[in-house]
Amino acid sequence: MTELPDMLAAGPEIFLAVMGMVLMMVGVFSSEKRALGIVSGLAVASLVVTLASVVWMADGRIVAFSGLFLTDSFAVFMKTLVLLGAVLVLIMSENYIQREGMARFEFPVLVIYATVGMMMMISANDLISLYIGLELQSLSLYVLAAFQRDRGRSSEAGLKYFVLGALSSCLLLYGCSLIYGFTGTTQFEALAVLFTGKESAASPGLVVGIVFLSAGLAFKVSAVPFHMWTPDVYEGAPTPVTAFFAVAPKIAAIALFLRVMLEPFGGLIDEWRQIIVLISVASMVLGAFAAVAQRNIKRLMAYSSIGHVGYALVGLASGSEAGLRGVLIYMAIYLVMNVGAFACILCMQINGRMVEQIDDLAGSAKSHPMMALGILVFMFSLAGIPPMAGFFGKFFIFTAAIEAELYTLAIIGVVSSVVGAFYYLRIVKIVYFDDLLEPFDKPIGRSLGTIMTLSGVVTILFFLYPAPILDSASIAAAALFPG
């Protein structure tokens, strides 16, 4: 009788994993020309059904599989963002993978399995299930990065990500083994009990374990100094894969980071806060200054993502419910901004070939005014300029830092945001004020146009009706702060 609740708690993940196997069979037994279209359509439908089932299970906290897996409001919120990101990327990628000679049905299947891994990460309630979910995601992403196998850059991106990802897994596993060795348990709830109360204290060995665990997680969110893979992989991977990397895995890894730090080790905030502050400051500063010299827009977006991770970690460093709420709001807005920005990047085609240089955008407002408007909106939002949605994401983050008396961290964040605005505004200047060199191809495609429009509308009008995201984030944050 105990298996039924377990199966129900993990129902969305089980359904999506089963559909991944079904889609592999469908792809194998379909004709080569039709396989991708059929599998992609079914993959999007499977993700939508999974999203509906996740939202349907939104009430309460369920712990399943002997404490290895849990679902709560926090998990529902983050899984919703991950599934939305996966759906939008699959829709955006359809024309690209056909045009670039990547028309193989394995692409949507790999996205499905990566998404299953992300959902397991978000619901992890044990160091063991944490690692299993992380590796299921990572193995799929290694292949996706190298999916355009006829291009050396793509193969190089996949190899770099694999080698450095294996190193980060070693760091994370070593940290987990130290934590287990010094506490005798891997379950988050048991760890939380050990470190609850005024007399709780961490041994030096346990602190070292938390440091190694944080290093492994910092790699997954591409936080400095574990960011070295990000620019090369973002540039070398196919553009839809880069878009996927920028949204869904980032959100899932941030969710895992939040849960691990605040649930099992919430009582040791004084021990780990300085680690988070350090990597947050380093990420914000490097993301702001390193992107200034970039001429490839995908590399620029890589450094942009590093900076945004730094801002998100400001909320974690605050260690409060307000800080967690700020991170959740920030990640929801981050999803919309980045999906819209990559939809614009996917429109950068000249004579049927993709271009990636920022200078190729010169004067594009004259030939593609709607795309140029989209670039303006998303760049302003990424820079945090009001009244765009990105401003409010940073506002909630920095407000939480100030409430936690982390004044220096908040000031560094604001200054980094101002510096980062330079390279975002430079793109807008190139688009609107430079001379047109060679116009992009027309039309841009219905799916890309629709996603760009919807993302732009949400980004611009967020301030008029922010209640759905703010209320959902408040409920999700309360799940990790039940007291």
Image (spheres, rainbow, N blue to C red):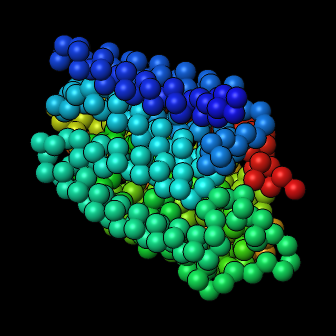
Which corner quadrant holds the N terminus?
top right
Q: Residue at x 50, y 44 (%)?
A: 118
In the image shown, does 356 or 185 lie closer to the viewer?
Answer: 185
Q: Is residue 284 above or below residue 145?
A: below
Residue found at x 75% / y 53%: 480
Residue 344 appears anywhere in the view? no
Q: How many marks?
A: 0
Q: Residue furthest front?
A: 1
Residue 334 to residue 99: above or below: below
Residue drawn at the location 46% of the way across and 38% of the way down: 115
Q: Residue at x 87, y 56 (%)?
A: 483
**20 to the left or right of 330:** left
Q: Position of residue 111 (x, y in %)?
A: 38, 36
Image coords of residue 407 (percent x, y): 73, 76
* Side of 420 where 52 appears, left or right: right
Res 114 → quadrant: top left
Report if residue 134 is visible in the image. yes
| 481 relative position to 216: left or right | right
Q: Position of residue 337 (x, y in %)?
A: 52, 43
- Give the vertical position of 301 relative to 458 (above or below): below
Q: Position of residue 216 (x, y in %)?
A: 47, 66
